[in-house]
């Protein structure tokens, strides 16, 4: 069935280092992928989204490229900041034959140390 | 700034009681949702409501039901709460199904 996998539950890094949070998905339909970020005691907010194959999308220093060949949409940043500490969710939106699904991954907690 | 409003922020109740949570969005969106976020922070969609069409996640127990008066409001009723219902319930809206979700601040439910 359709699914989203985030392999890292917890990532801890020192400020200034690069980060990549993994997201892979499984579906036979045309995918629309999202990254949401949730800071402590706040609501999730959209970070990035894409449905275009092999096109990089960027926002607030974060970037991701949807690769349909490998079913991946990894989130990257070249230099993390303390304020990036948060929970990151990858999500998959699917529409087919009048039906619709939205599937969230299990989330990756990013902690950035001074 | 907040455009999806939820009340109450926090609710404590006992097993078997009925509870109702409110959600209102001022974004003019056509679709609204309810999510459950458990203690492990897993986020699971429960319902989506668009133009009087309700889509229900089949894993949601029947004691949960959404209630809508218009496209700006989608409330959540839980009839006879269970301990496993303790969680944060997040309301969201989007221009259409599958679009970017805008989340409210959540209602934290504790069932004793």
Image (spheres, coloured by chain):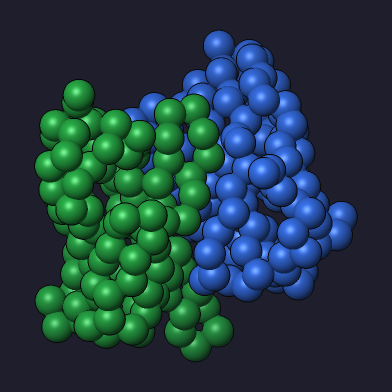
Chain colours: A green, B blue
- Quarter placement of the N terminus of chain B: top right
- Compared to residue B33, the image places residue B108 above or below, namely above
Residue at screen point 20% across, 62% down = A74
Quarter-of-image position of residue A12: top left
- Compared to residue A73, the image places residue A20 above or below, namely above
- Compared to residue B83, the image places residue B93 above or below, namely below
Across and down, in percent, residue A108 comes to: 25, 42
Q: Is residue A23 visible?
A: no
Total numbered labels placed on residues in the image: 0
B26 displayed left or right of A98: right
Q: Nearer the viewer, residue B27 or B71?
A: B27
Residue at screen point 55% across, 59% down = B101
Across and down, in percent, residue A6 comes to: 21, 52
A73 displayed left or right of B60: left
Q: Nearer the viewer, residue B60 or A95?
A: A95
- Quarter placement of the C terminus of chain B: top right
Residue at screen point 13% across, 48% down = A18
A98 displayed left or right of B5: left
- Residue at the outermost bottom position: A97
Residue at screen point 24% across, 31% down = A111
Quarter-of-image position of residue A107: top left
Q: Is residue B103 visible?
A: yes
Across and down, in percent, residue A79 comes to: 19, 46
Q: Nearer the viewer, residue B81 or A112?
A: A112
Across and down, in percent, residue A84 comes to: 32, 39
B58 displayed left or right of A10: right
Q: Nearer the viewer, residue B47 or A90?
A: A90
- Compared to residue A52, the image places residue B106 above or below, namely above
- Residue at the outermost right position: B69
């Amino acid at each position: 069935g359709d699914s989203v996998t985030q392999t890292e539950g917890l990532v801890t890094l020192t400020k200034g280092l690069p980060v990549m949070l993994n997201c892979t998905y499984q579906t036979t339909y045309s995918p629309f992928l999202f990254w949401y970020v949730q800071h402590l005691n706040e609501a999730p907010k959209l970070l990035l989204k894409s449905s275009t194959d092999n096109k990089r999308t960027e926002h607030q220093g974060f970037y991701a490229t949807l690769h349909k060949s490998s079913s991946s949409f990894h989130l990257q940043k070249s230099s993390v900041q303390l304020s990036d500490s948060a929970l990151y969710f990858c999500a998959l939106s699917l529409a087919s034959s009048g039906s619709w699904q939205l599937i969230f991954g299990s989330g990756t907690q990013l902690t950035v140390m001074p | 700034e907040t455009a999806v409003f939820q009340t109450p922020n926090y609710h404590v109740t006992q097993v078997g009681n009925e509870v109702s949570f409110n959600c209102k969005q001022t974004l003019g969106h056509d679709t609204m949702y309810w999510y459950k976020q458990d203690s492990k922070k897993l986020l699971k969609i429960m319902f989506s409501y668009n133009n009087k069409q309700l889509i229900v996640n089949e894993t949601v127990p029947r004691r949960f039901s959404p209630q809508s008066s218009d496209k700006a409001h989608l409330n959540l009723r839980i009839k006879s709460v269970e301990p496993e219902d303790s969680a944060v319930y997040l309301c969201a809206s989007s221009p259409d199904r599958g679009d970017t979700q805008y989340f409210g601040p959540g209602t934290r439910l504790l069932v004793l």
